[in-house]
Image (cartoon, grey):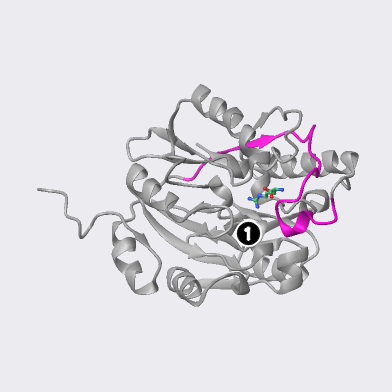
């Protein structure tokens, strides 16, 4: 039978388009590994997001090292294998490994990675180091066309819906929406796109934490009305963070494997709600990284 375009994968942005996408999003295994980059050269040397403003030169390196170690240990304790890449001189943001690419495992069990095109020239030289890791670990590498696509920042903006071959794609600040046409075709998956409208929430992972297949934590003010409608249609339970929890405490940048949630400490009401839903919560301190605009989620990239 010819491949019908009715059931083909799509890039969508409205709630009424969701049923067709859900009907076609097959099962995807959960990743059991993460990639982290050691923070030997982590610092704030330039300003490319509002959180970095006023923080140039203000990283306490020892504290940062301790905080990174605690995040790594939290991932290990929750049962994930942690691969550690060496940090590189003059790449102060390389520790945010979520941004380097988008890994995928296809229906045959083959591993793939689409490499990022960083929006800022300050970060472009980080990507080849991640690419080298993926190559050495059996991934097929894919590149976006830099003439057509200005920017794509990997798992900072592109989040897999757990258990499904379906991707959430944030755009507006660090990723061009066109990147999702390429990804949808190359990986044969549907992409649910979300426009971001608040500069402080410049990556999707700063305002949306997918906790499990049916549960999400968001900062609603970061999204458009269409985006919110799509999120509310796709998830049974939508937890909402307040402005302090989201912007100061980066709660939406938590990492969840469906059971364990690793989250920046200091948001008791969110933690209570998570526990009430049955999640095991590990609170960590990532203050030095929040100064740079990131927390738990973006300090790792998932891998299979
Ligand atoms: N300073 C980094 C940047 O602005 C932080 C990246 C945080 N990553 C993330 N996925 N939120 O690029």
Q: Decide: is 141 above or below 208.
A: above
**Looking at the image, which residue sits at the far front?**
147
Q: Nearer the viewer, residue 21 or 124?
A: 124
Dot 1 alpha-carbon crowd within 10 angstroms: few under 14, some 14 to 19, many 20 or more: many
Visible residue check, residue 237: yes
Q: Decide whether residue 283 is among the magenta residues.
A: no
Q: Which of the 4 image quarters holds residue 177? A: bottom left
**Looking at the image, which residue sits at the far left?**
1
Q: Position of residue 182 (x, y in %)?
A: 38, 46
**Secondary structure category for the residue under label 1:** loop
Q: Decide: is 58 above or below 137.
A: below
- Look at 37% across and 35% down and name the residue there: 109
Residue 264 vs residue 116: left or right? right
- Look at 88% across and 39% down and name the residue there: 61
**Which residues fall within the magenta stretch?**
30-55
Q: Position of residue 236 (x, y in %)?
A: 48, 72
Q: Which residue is the site of mark 1?
A: 202
Q: Quick check: is the Cβ at mark 1 less than 8 Å away from ligand 1?
A: yes
Visible residue check, residue 82: no
Q: Decide whether residue 38 is among the magenta residues.
A: yes
- Look at 70% across and 74% down and name the residue there: 242
Q: Decide: is 148 above or below 211.
A: above
Residue 32 vs residue 111: left or right? right
How many numbered marks appear?
A: 1
């Amino acid at each position: 039978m010819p491949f019908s375009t009715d059931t083909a994968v799509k890039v969508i942005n409205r709630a009424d388009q969701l049923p067709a996408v859900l009907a076609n999003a097959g099962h995807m295994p959960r990743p059991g590994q993460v990639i982290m980059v050691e923070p030997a050269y982590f610092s704030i040397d330039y300003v490319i997001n509002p959180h970095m403003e006023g923080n140039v030169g203000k990283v306490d390196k020892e504290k940062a090292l301790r905080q990174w170690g605690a995040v790594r240990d939290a991932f290990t304790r929750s049962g994930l294998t942690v691969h550690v890449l060496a940090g590189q001189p003059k790449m102060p943001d390389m520790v945010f490994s979520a941004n380097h690419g988008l890994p995928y495992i296809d229906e045959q069990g083959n591993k793939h990675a689409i490499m990022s095109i960083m929006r800022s020239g300050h970060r472009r030289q980080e990507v080849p180091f991640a690419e080298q890791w993926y190559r050495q670990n059996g991934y097929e590498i894919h590149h976006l066309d830099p003439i057509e696509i200005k920017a794509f920042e990997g798992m900072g903006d592109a989040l897999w819906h757990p258990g499904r071959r379906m991707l959430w794609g944030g755009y507006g600040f660090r990723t061009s929406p066109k990147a999702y046409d390429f990804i949808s075709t190359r990986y044969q998956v549907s992409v649910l796109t979300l426009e971001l409208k608040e500069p402080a929430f410049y990556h999707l992972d700063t305002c949306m934490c997918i906790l499990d297949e049916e549960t999400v934590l968001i900062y609603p003010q970061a999204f458009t009305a269409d985006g919110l409608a799509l999120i509310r249609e796709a998830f049974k339970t939508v937890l909402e963070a307040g402005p302090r929890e989201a912007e100061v405490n980066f709660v939406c940048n938590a990492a969840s494997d469906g059971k364990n949630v690793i989250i920046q400490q200091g948001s008791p009401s969110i933690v209570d709600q998570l526990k009430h839903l049955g999640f095991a919560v590990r609170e960590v301190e990532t203050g030095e990284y929040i100064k740079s605009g990131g927390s738990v989620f973006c300090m790792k990239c998932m891998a299979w």
